[in-house]
Image: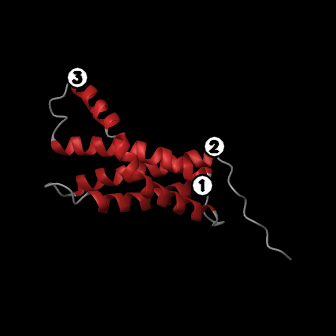
Amino acid sequence: MKRYLVFALVGPFVGGFLLLLTTTYQSGYWTQTNWGEVGKLFVVFFKTLQYSYLFGFLPSLMIGAVDDILIHVRRVGPGLRMLLVGLIAFILAAFTYSSRGADSGAVQFILYGLVGFVPAVLSSWLVHRYVEEPQPAAAAS
């Protein structure tokens, strides 16, 4: 249960911030930016945080379920599990968001994929580091 709580808290927060950074980069916002503009970015982030949780809650829980399934596979270690969870989240986020806007290409695909990859790997690492993981059960003889 703690695993899903970590994914539900961390995923939308980090993913929402990265999505905001990606969309502002795609719009050309960062070409002539000063410190006042960066402050406005954080204001927008905190004003839209409720929507990040509204729309990011279920995808984060789905990625948490993938992490939960992979923890029960005996041959998958923590590092490989984090990588697999991150790759699945990368693919899902890239295909979900990269068709937005007029731009298309490898840069947009990678940027939107990182919106899924970074929160998934971070959440999986936090779960591995701070939440007790169940040990595989021994076969009954």
Residue closer to the observer: 109 or 46 = 46
- Mark 2 or mark 1, which is nearer the start of the sequence? 1
Dot 2 crowding, Cα within 10 Å, few <14, some 14–19, many 20+: few
Q: Which residue is mark 2?
A: 130
Q: At 32% from the left edge and 35% from the top edge, which residue is drawn?
A: 47
Determine which of the numbered discs, if any, sits on residue 36 in the image: 3
Which badge, 2 or 3, is on the more N-terminal residue? 3
Q: Which residue is mark 1?
A: 78
Q: Is residue 53 above or below residue 47?
A: below
Quarter the N terminus occupies: bottom right
Camera-nearest label, 1 or 2: 2
At x 72% / y 64%, what residue is drawn? 136
Left or right: residue 61 compared with residue 48: right
**Amino acid type shown at disc 1:** Pro
* Total marks in image: 3
Which mark sits nearer the N-terminus, 3 or 1?
3
